[in-house]
Amino acid sequence: MEIGGVLISSDIITERFCCDLEACGGACCIEGDAGAPVAEAEVAELRGALDAVWPLLPARSQSAIDRRGVVYTDAEGDLVTNIVDGRECVFAYRPGGGEDAATGLPAGCCLCALERAWRGGLTSFAKPVSCALYPIREKRFAGGLVGLNLHRWDICRAAFERGRELGMPVYRFLREPLVRRFGQAWYDELCEVAELIGA
């Protein structure tokens, strides 16, 4: 279906999803073979947030950024966040000790240092929109057309199960990043379509 010039896979409306960090430990920040997709306009934001996130980053991430910067072009020609050891995003952050209680996260859970700094009021950039939208993946087509698909990754199995238990549709769980990316009017139209099809 198409909403406001954006092609949307129907399972974004019909499928249920709710992150379960106790089950996955924030694995989406540390698993995979490439970094998170980054829009060209976000590169300056990533660089601008470095001072705020630097104290949160482990030495190996700091070293990777010093050597290769915050982004690189992957094998498919996409701009992505830099990674460490061929898999972990350089912005992955693991709170320790008393910080676990401060963040409300399970001990040893990984999260985005950019988001941590943003939530602490230290930066105006939350994190790349591709990260915020996950498990929705954005694809660009010729002529500027944008498509949104639901990505199913084994590490998120518990999140789909939890979403079904809670009755939380993907598009509702991701309201904030969808509004950030496409605007409130677009999101309102998406909600209207969802109501019409009874999802």
Image: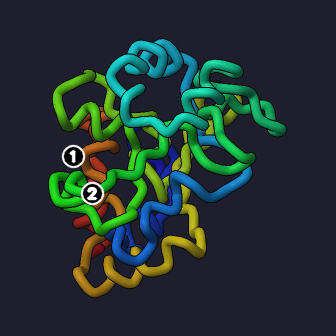
**Secondary structure of the residue carrying numbered label 2:** loop
Q: Residue furthest right?
A: 75
Report whether residue 192 is seen.
Answer: no
Question: In the rendered image of this protein, does residue 158 appear above or below residue 85?
Answer: below
Position of residue 107 measured from the top left corner of the image (x, y, whole percent):
32, 67
Q: Which residue is mark 2?
A: 97
Nearer the observer, 124 or 83? 83
Residue at 37% from the left image edge and 29% from the top image edge: 55
Decide: is 152 above or below 85.
Answer: below
- In the image, what residue type sits under mark 2? Gly
Q: Identify which residue is drawn at 52% across, 58% down.
A: 28
Image coordinates for residue 112, horizontal then vertical, percent: 40, 44
Give coordinates of residue 40: x percent, y percent.
57, 19
Disc 1 residue type (three-letter): Asp
Tag 1 secondary structure? helix
**141 vs 50, nearest the viewer:** 50
Residue 9, horizontal then vertical, whole percent: 51, 60
- Residue placed under numbered mark 1 in the picture: 188
